[in-house]
Image: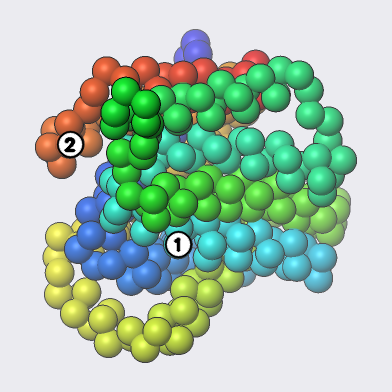
Amino acid sequence: MPYLGEVLSLGVAVSWTATALFAETGSKRLGALQLNVIRMTLSLLMLALTLWWFTGSPFPLYADAKTWFWLSLSGFVGYVLGDYCLFNAYVLIGSRFGQLFMTLAPIAAAFSGWIILGECLSLQTVIGMLVTITGIGISIFNRKTSHRIGLKLPLRGVLLGIGAGVGQGVGLVLSKVGMNYYEMSIPDGMEEVTNLLPFASTFIRAIIGALGFILVMGYQKQFHTLASARHDRKGMGAALGATIFGPFVGVSFSLMAVQYTKAGIASTLMALTPIFILLPAHLLFKQKITLKEIAGAIISVLGVSLFFL
């Protein structure tokens, strides 16, 4: 099929959009912490079944100590810190602004890749950073008086959005380090294990994510809230949707996409979520969307594209 990789990449952007919408609904009905505990648990079950079906073991095979260390660190930064910020941001500023702040992830990834991996920061990358930040600024600032510009969003929501984007970007780089160690630890001739490496890596990250959120829930003495969450059918349905379209369908499509098209093209198309989410957020949540916000989302995505093209 012509342009299969491009079609799959657009499918990923649609999948991330659905994930964000489900997550906003679930976070507001169940609570951000509760939703993350449920989502991580469901993710582990789905990933374990996938690994068992294709490799014969529900657990990652051949992962050494270095692999576990880096992927665990990635799970803590990306899931426990990043997703905690993201899902709480959904409650305060909604999924469309939450996804807009996720365009900060490539900036965080570029800086952490420079620090951790020694990767170069090109002029085009720096320009992409500035364009992305400009787009976000256009969307979240407004003129209060002729001499004063202020935030039109709660400051806490903005800080949570920034934390989510930074956690996602840094977690991605840590995942890259862990997956490199994982690939080196797999014996030759084990193609079925190598092909499932991203899923096995995600499984390790999800273990840390689940444990982290459970510990936070225990510290806050909120385990009793899970019992009431089970009886909220709409909330549980949203949690299931956020799990399926996020770690499962989204990851699967993204892995397939890079097999059929260039990684830069795939990454750029996958980053269209802040634009795709505008119309459904308006229709589902009755959120007013201005031309300035649309322009800001487009400019942010253009900035992201400069990282990859």
Q: Circle 2 — which element?
A: loop
Q: Distance between the residues labelled 1 and 2?
A: 23 Å
Name the image quarter holding residue 228.
bottom left
Mark 2: give few (<14), some (14-19) or many (20+) Cα within 10 Å.
some
Q: Do the residues under discs 1 and 2 have CB atoms within 8 angstroms?
A: no
Taking 271 as reference, is 295 left or right? left
Taking 295 as reference, is 122 left or right? right
Q: Is residue 277 above or below residue 209?
A: above
Task: Point out the tag, 1 or 2, that comes first from the N-terminus.
Answer: 1
Q: Circle 1 — which element?
A: helix
Taking 75 as reference, is 173 left or right? right
Q: Is residue 73 above or below residue 124?
A: below
Residue displayed at 15% across by 60% down: 234
* Farthest residue, direction front: 147
Amino acid found under the numbered disc labelled 2: Gln
* Farthest residue, direction top: 2
Query: Closer to the camera, 239 or 73?
Result: 73
Q: In this view, does 275 lie above or below 88?
A: above
- Residue 221 placement (x, y as % from top left): 37, 88
- Residue 260 placement (x, y as % from top left): 59, 22
Per the image, the residue denoted by label 2 is 287
Per the image, the residue denoted by label 1 is 84
- Residue 58 placement (x, y as % from top left): 56, 68
Mark 1: give few (<14), some (14-19) or many (20+) Cα within 10 Å.
many
Q: Is residue 49 above or below residue 293?
A: below
Name the image quarter holding residue 187.
bottom right
Residue displayed at 28% across by 67% down: 31
Residue displayed at 51% across by 34% down: 103
Amino acid found under the numbered disc labelled 1: Tyr
- Residue 37 placement (x, y as % from top left): 40, 71
